[in-house]
Amino acid sequence: MAGKERAERRRRWTPEGWIRTRRVVQALALLAFVVLFVWSRRGGWPAMLVNAPMRLDPLAMLAHLIASRTVLAGSALALVVVGLTLALGRVWCGWLCPLGTLLDWIPLRRRRSRHRSVPEGWRGVKYGLLLTILAAALFTNLTLLVFDPLTILFRTLSTAIWPGVDQVVTGAETVLYQVPFLQGVVGAFDRLVRPVVLPVEPVFYRYSVLYAGVFLGVIGLNVIAPRFWCRYVCPLGALLGLLSKLSLVQREVNERCTECGACARTCPTGTIRKEDAYASDSGECTMCLDCLAACPEKAIGFPARISEPDWREYDPDRRHLLASLGASIAGIGLFQGNLLANRDHPRLIRPPGARENALLSKCIRCGECNRACPTSAIQPAVDEAGLEGLWTPVLVPRAGYCDYSCNACGQVCPVEAIPPLRLEEKRQRVIGQAYIDENRCIAWADATDCIVCEEMCPMPEKAIVLDEAEMLRGDGERVTVQRPRVIRERCIGCGICEYKCPVNGEAAIRVYVPSEGVGAVSF
C-alpha cells in the first residue's frame, strides 16, 4: 500500500502533474477573484477581504505610496507577491493573475507558430510604461494605473460584464415566468440570487461599451502573439519581471539539450530563443513549466540558487529612465494646462469625503467603489475630470443617488482615496448642491403640483421645502401650486431628488459641484 502511494506521488509530480497543478491553481485563483468581486457589494463580505486582490498588487500599492506620500498598513499585503516573486520568479503571472489566466484560456493564436511577428525590442514597452507610471507618481499623478491588469479586469466586471449578466438573467426570468408551471421555480431562483449575487434593481453604467472594448482589446492582442499583453504591455508584469531577475528559482538548460526547439515552440511568452542556446530571460519567464513537459530529453530544470541578473537589450536603462521621466513631465504639463485642472467641471460630484482627500493622488482606478455602490451612482469619470482624473469615481445622480444610509464606498476602497467615514459623519459631508430649473420644473413651468423632490429628500430637516403660490395657467385659470425651493445650507447633494425627478430627459432639479469652502452641514 505504501509503495502504491509513493508511486502515485511520483506520478503526480511529473512535469505533466505540475502543469495540471498549475491549471487547477489558475482556475481557483480566477474563481476566488470573481467570488470576491461578487461579494464586494454593499452588505457583502468584510471590506478587508474583498479588496485583498487590489492590495496584493505591488504596482498599485507602490504607485499609491509614491503619489500620496502615505503608508497604509493594508498595502503591506503586496509584499506577499514581492516575496513570492523573489523566491520563485513570475509565478504571479503564470499561476495566479486572473487576467493572465483568461489570456491563457483564450489564446486566439497557436503557440507553435515559428514565425516571430513582433520584434524582441517591443518587450521594452512595458518597462517604459512601468517607469512612466512611477515617474508620474512622483508628481502625484496616477492616471496610467488604468493599465494595471487587476484594475482593468475589476473595472470591466463592474461596469460591463456583471450588468450584462444581470440583464441576460432578468430577460430569461421574464420570458420563463410567462410559463405557469415555471413561475415557482423562477421565483425561487430569483430569491436565491438577489441580492446575494445579482442586484435587486438593475444597474446601468455609462460607456459600458468603452470598458468592454478595452478588455476585449487586451484579449484580442492574442491574435498577434500568445499573451501579447503580458509580453509587451503589462506594467505589473514589468515590475515583477525586474524582481524575477533576482529570484532564487530560475529556469536552466543542461547539457542533455539536443536543440530540438520543442521548448521554444511551447513557451507562451516566447522568451526561449535558439540564439541563446534555448535559455530564457528570467524576467520574461512566467514559470508555467510548459517547457518542462515538452522537453523529450529532460534537459530543463528549475534549481534554487543565487544567480547573476541576466540583462537583455530591451531591459530598462538610464536612457529609458530619462525618457520616462520626460514623458511624465510632459504629460502632467498637458494635464495641468487643461481647463478642468483649474476649474471643476460643474458635474464633478465626488463620493463623500473624496474631494477634500486629495483623490487624484490616491485613487488607483480599481473600480471597487463602483461595485460597492448599491444604486450605481458612482461611475468612472470620462470627461468630467479631464485626462488626469480619467476613470476616477464620480457621482452621476441621473443614474443613481448617494444612499443616505450607506457608506460602503469608503469602507471598500483599498487605499482610502474615499475615506472610510462613519455613517453619521458621511451624512454630513456635502458632495454637491441642488438647483431647480424653473423652466423645466412641473410646478414652476406648468403650474401643476409635483412634490416628488421634497418627498424624497432624506435630510432630517428637509433641504427642499414647498412654497404655496398663486399661478396663472395657460388656459387662464388661476390656481394655487406648491413650488419646491432648495435651502442650500441643508443640502448635501445626495442626488436622490435628481434621480427621482419625473421629468423626462434632463431632470428639472440637478446637483452641481459644491461651492468652495462648503464641506459639511450640521443638524
Image: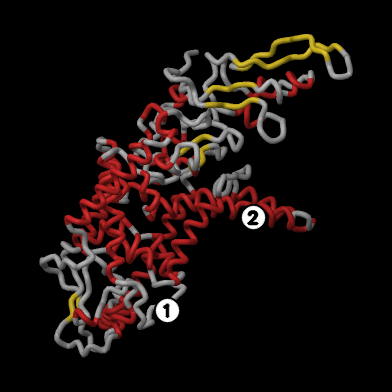
Question: Which is more toward the observer, 407 or 224?
Answer: 224
454 over 296 or under it: above or below: above
**Picture coordinates of residue 388, whole percent (x, y):** 39, 40
Image quadrant where one finds the N terminus? bottom left
46 over 490 or under it: above or below: below
The disc placed on residue 438 is none
Horizontal relation, residue 154 to residue 261: left or right: right
Question: Which is more toward the observer, 407 or 139?
Answer: 139
Q: Nearer the viewer, mark 1 or mark 2?
A: 1
Quadrant of the rendered structure where residue 65 is? Answer: top left
The residue carrying pointer 2 sits among few (fewer than 14), some (14 to 19) or many (20 or more) residues within 10 Å by Cα, namely some
Horizontal relation, residue 395 to residue 304: left or right: right
Three-letter code, disc 2: Val
Q: Name the residue located 77 percent from the left edge and 14 percent from the top edge.
A: 481
Query: For the residue labelled by badge 1, is the local secondary structure a helix, a strand or a loop?
Result: loop
Q: Is residue 5 visible?
A: no
Question: Which is more toward the observer, 509 or 297?
Answer: 509
Horizontal relation, residue 166 to residue 105: left or right: right
The disc placed on residue 110 is 1
Of marks 1 and 2, which one's residue comes earlier in the chain?
1
Q: Is residue 89 visible?
A: yes
**Picture coordinates of residue 95, whole percent (x, y):** 33, 65
**Picture coordinates of residue 72, whole percent (x, y):** 27, 38
Indicate the colouring scheme.
secondary structure
Three-letter code, disc 1: Arg
Q: Name the residue located 48 percent from the left edge and 47 percent from the top edge.
A: 39
**Picture coordinates of residue 219, whole percent (x, y):** 46, 64
> Where is mark 2, residue-wise?
169
Cβ atoms at labels 1 and 2 below 8 Å apart: no
